[in-house]
Image (cartoon, rainbow, N blue to C red):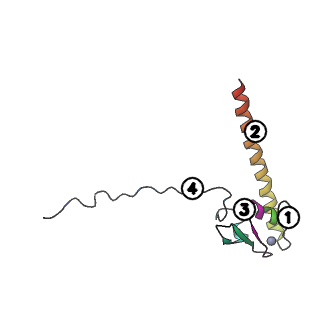
Amino acid sequence: MASTGNGSSSFSSPVRVAIRKNAIGNKTDPTWPYTVLLDVKSRRVKCKFCELIFTGPAYRMKHHLAGTGRDVSSCRMVPPDVKKAMQFLIGLDTIERRLVEMKRELVEMRNLF
Ligand SMILES: [Zn+2]
């Protein structure tokens, strides 16, 4: 008895990779080259410049490097060009957030009519 017809269904299901924006450990995050991820579960990261260790979302690292002093202490070792880049990114984040808010308001207004 020889079985034939094996291997006709060898196509694999497509794998969907969901990349969450601002997720910790996200290698596409602009702060990634300047941080060391110590623990994914507790979201512990270390600044490569001043070796400060803190936990929390990736935006805190941006504020640390940009030196805004918001939610987190400013980095004293960050090179000026990196600092400038982070300040620029925070500006973009703010614009993006405002656009989302505006869109939401528009939807709410549309629902009134
Ligand atoms: Zn630092």
Q: Return the x and y of residue 46 as percentages of the image width and height.
A: 74, 72
Q: Which of the two labelled residues, at mark 2 and mark 3, occupies the earlier sequence position?
A: 3
Residue wearing tag 1: 67
Q: Which of the two labelled residues, at mark 1 and mark 4, occupies the earlier sequence position?
A: 4
Residue wearing tag 4: 18
On screen, residue 69 versus residue 10, left or right, reads: right
Q: Amino acid at mark 1?
A: Gly
Q: Return the x and y of residue 47 as percentages of the image width and height.
A: 76, 72
| Disc 1 to disc 2, C-alpha distance | 28 Å
On residue 102, which mark appears?
2
Q: Amino acid at mark 3?
A: Ala
Measuring 75% from the left and 59% from the top, which residue is drawn there? 59
Q: Amino acid at mark 4?
A: Ala
| Disc 1 to disc 4, C-alpha distance | 31 Å
**Circles 4 and 3 in contact, beta carbons < 8 Å:** no
Q: Which of the two labelled residues, at mark 4 and mark 3, occupies the earlier sequence position?
A: 4
Q: Return the x and y of residue 45 as percentages of the image width and height.
A: 72, 70
Measuring 85% from the left and 67% from the top, which residue is drawn there? 74
Secondary structure at numbered mark 1: loop
- Please tell me in which quarter of the rendered image ligand 1 is found: bottom right
Measuring 75% from the left and 35% from the top, which residue is drawn there? 105
- Please identify the residue farthest to the top as the structure is shown: 113
* Picture quadrant where residue 69 is located: bottom right
| Disc 1 to disc 3, C-alpha distance | 14 Å
Instruction: Give the quadrant of the C terminus.
Output: top right
| Disc 2 to disc 4, C-alpha distance | 26 Å
What residue range appears in magenta?
A: 48-61
Residue wearing tag 3: 58
